[in-house]
Every structure is written in structure tokens, then in C-alpha cells.
Image: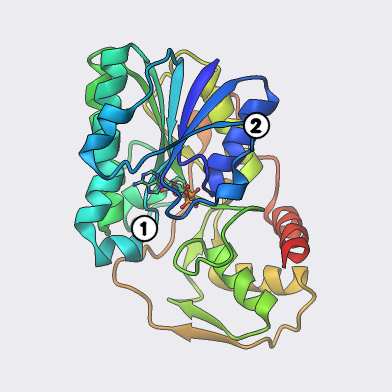
Amino acid sequence: MRVIVTGGAGFIGSHLVSRLIRLGHEVLVIDNFSTGIRSSVLQQLDVLELDLSSPEFVNKLPKGDFDAICHLAAQSAGSVSADNPLYDLQANAMSTLLLSRWCIEKGISRFLYASSMVTYGNTDKSPVSEDQLCLPRSYYGVSKLTSEHYLRLGALEGLKPTSFRMFSVYGPGQDLENVRQGMVSIYLSYMLRGVEVPVTGSFERFRDFIYIDDVVDAWISALNLSSTPQLVYNIGSGSGTTVRELLMLLLQTLDLSSDYPICEMTGSDNDQFGLYADINNIRNDLDWVPNTDLSEGLRLMYEWAAKIL
Ligand SMILES: NC(=O)c1ccc[n+]([C@@H]2O[C@H](COP(=O)([O-])OP(=O)(O)OC[C@H]3O[C@@H](n4cnc5c(N)ncnc54)[C@H](O)[C@@H]3O)[C@@H](O)[C@H]2O)c1
């Protein structure tokens, strides 16, 4: 299969690209390297350096035949979207609109999209299933939900989209320098540096942490299908972990004392309090289950981080 992966230099995209290559697929990476890391893209790969936040990118898209596109390129931090909502709209929603129109025109029907659990907003009902009302609390959440809707409209014109509402993805390769995105990577990064961990928001908030290899399994399963019964699927572990529990697990993994300095600070109004995924639909339709539990995933991530620091 010939596959375009936008955001292929990023955390999730680079894992997806590696797996696709291992499975014998041909991959073209499109990325502007704003948060992606050049060295994480395999040397022999085709790379098109493009900024998808500028509408002119459409004129520079490749000519050849492709079977599918996996669109992961995005600015992916809620706080960044609060600072610059227009950029978020362009990089996230406009890029999806233009890429989907281009795919329809070129007859590339399979379109996999990196959506997010932030589309749900605050909900007091967990596990949360895909048919729940979405009321995003951040511009980032709005741009992800808008993208899903553009793809739903594209489906009326022959596109075969699948959007994945990924919960909190973590694992080796996550950017430990970026302290604006990724709860696990942020806390781990402070602990590895031996400094106090600032936690913006309550320790009682909870999230659904899902290991990177499990996420890639889901994308590959979907790519092997010409379409999926639903347009949108959650990817999560199916269980919730409080911030307090995550911090304790990280301290155990790093063999640090339970009285390690951690400071609970005022959170952002846009933050979600807590939710975890209902994974029945993806389990049934994609025959997918998560295989790595949080303790094991944190151990694997720590082993990786200890090697690179
Ligand atoms: N990490 C998570 O927990 C999580 C959860 C839900 C959804 N997502 C979504 O998954 C996708 C990948 O996330 P990630 O954690 O790998 O983030 P990341 O920042 O590591 O990767 C994003 C990639 O997109 C590229 N990019 C950003 N803006 C671009 C632009 N305008 N033009 C071209 N390339 C651009 C970056 O350089 C980077 O390589 C994003 O769409 C994100 O919103 C991530």
C-alpha cells in the first residue's frame, strides 16, 4: 500500500511510519517539523516539507498514486490553541478540509484522522462512548471536532474516513522537552531532571492513558479495512487513572520516594476534569484490544528515556 502520513515526524506519526515500513508499505511523510523531530524520520523515507496551516500547501501535494492518507499533523496543545486560536484553526481544521477535498479529487478514498478525546469536553459520564454529545472546551477541541465533521461530509462524496478520538497517548519517543503537551511525558521529564513537578490542576482529575504501540495497532487495523462501520472510534484503555495515581506509579517506576516534591497548582478553565473511553465499538469492529497496562507502559517509557538522557 502507498500511504501518506502527515505529522510523520511527530510522536504518534513516527511510530505509525515505522510500523508501516516494517509491514512493507511505501510511505510519504508530510511535515513542517514544528514539533516533529527530523531524526525520528527514517533516513530512506520520502519526506515532503510542507506547512499545512497555509492554504497554498494544496498546490505542492504529490502527484503520484496513493491508497490512503493518515492525517496526524496538527498543533496538539490546548494551551497553544488558547494563545493562537486562528493558527489552531488553520493547522488543524483547515488542513483537514483541504486534504479531504484533495483526496476526493484524486480518488484517494481511505482517510484516517487523528482526533482526540478533547472533542467530548467535560462529561460526568464515563466510560464515554462515541455517540455522546460533544461540547469541546478548547479551540483545539473545536478544531478536532470540526475536522471530524468535514470528513463526515466528505463521506457523502465517496471518502472513506475513520476518525480516532485518541485519549492520553504515552510512550517512548514522546518529546520530553515539550512541557505543554502530554501528562506522562511532562511529569516524567521533571522527575528525570530531579526537580519539583508542577501539576496544573487537581490531583483528583483522571485520564485514560493508552500506550503508543496499542494506538498504532488500531491505526493499522483500520488501514487494513477499506472502510469502517462507524466514522469515529475511541482509542483508550477503557479505564480511568487519577493524576495522583499516575504520579505514584511514576515515582515507583523511577524508584523515587513517595514524598518527592510535587506541587498542585491552579489549573486551566479549559481543562477537562476526567473521562475514560468506552472501547466496545473499536473492539467489535476492528477486533482491537489494548495489550499494555499502565505500569508496563511506564516501565518501557522510562527505560527509553533513561537511555537518551
Ligand atoms: N499525543 C496524544 O495524547 C494525542 C491524543 C489525541 C490526539 N492526538 C493527535 O494526534 C496527532 C499527533 O500527535 P502527537 O502527540 O504525535 O503530536 P506531535 O506534536 O508529536 O506531532 C505532530 C506532528 O505534526 C507536525 N505538524 C504540526 N503542525 C504542522 C503543520 N502546520 N504542517 C505540517 N506539519 C505539522 C509536527 O511537526 C509534528 O511532527 C495530532 O493531530 C494530535 O492532535 C494526540
Residue 124 is labelled as: 1
- Which of the two residues, 257 or 2, is positioned nearer the viewer here? 2
User: How has the structure been colored for display?
Assistant: rainbow
Which of the two marks, 2 or 1, is nearer to us in this view?
2
Quadrant of the image occupied by residue 106: top left
Q: Residue at x 50, y 63 (%)?
A: 206
Q: Is residue 283 visible?
A: no
| Neighbour tally class for label 1: few under 14, some 14-19, many 20 plus, Cα within 10 Å | few
Quadrant of the image occupied by residue 196: bottom right
Name the secondary structure under disc 2.
helix
Q: Amino acid at mark 2?
A: Arg
Q: Is residue 278 left or right of residue 305?
A: left
The residue labelled by disc 2 is 19
Relative to 180, residue 3 above or below = above
Q: Is residue 12 left or right of residue 96?
A: right
| Neighbour tally class for label 2: few under 14, some 14-19, many 20 plus, Cα within 10 Å | some
Q: Is residue 33 left or right of residue 248?
A: left
Q: Residue at x 53, y 65 (%)?
A: 183
Q: Amino acid at mark 1?
A: Asp
Q: Is mark 2 within 8 Å of ligand 1?
A: no
- Which of the two residues, 24 or 225, is positioned nearer the viewer here? 24
Q: CA distance from mark 2 to mark 1?
A: 36 Å
The percent coordinates of residue 298 (x first, y second) are 70, 59
Q: Residue at x 50, y 22 (%)?
A: 3
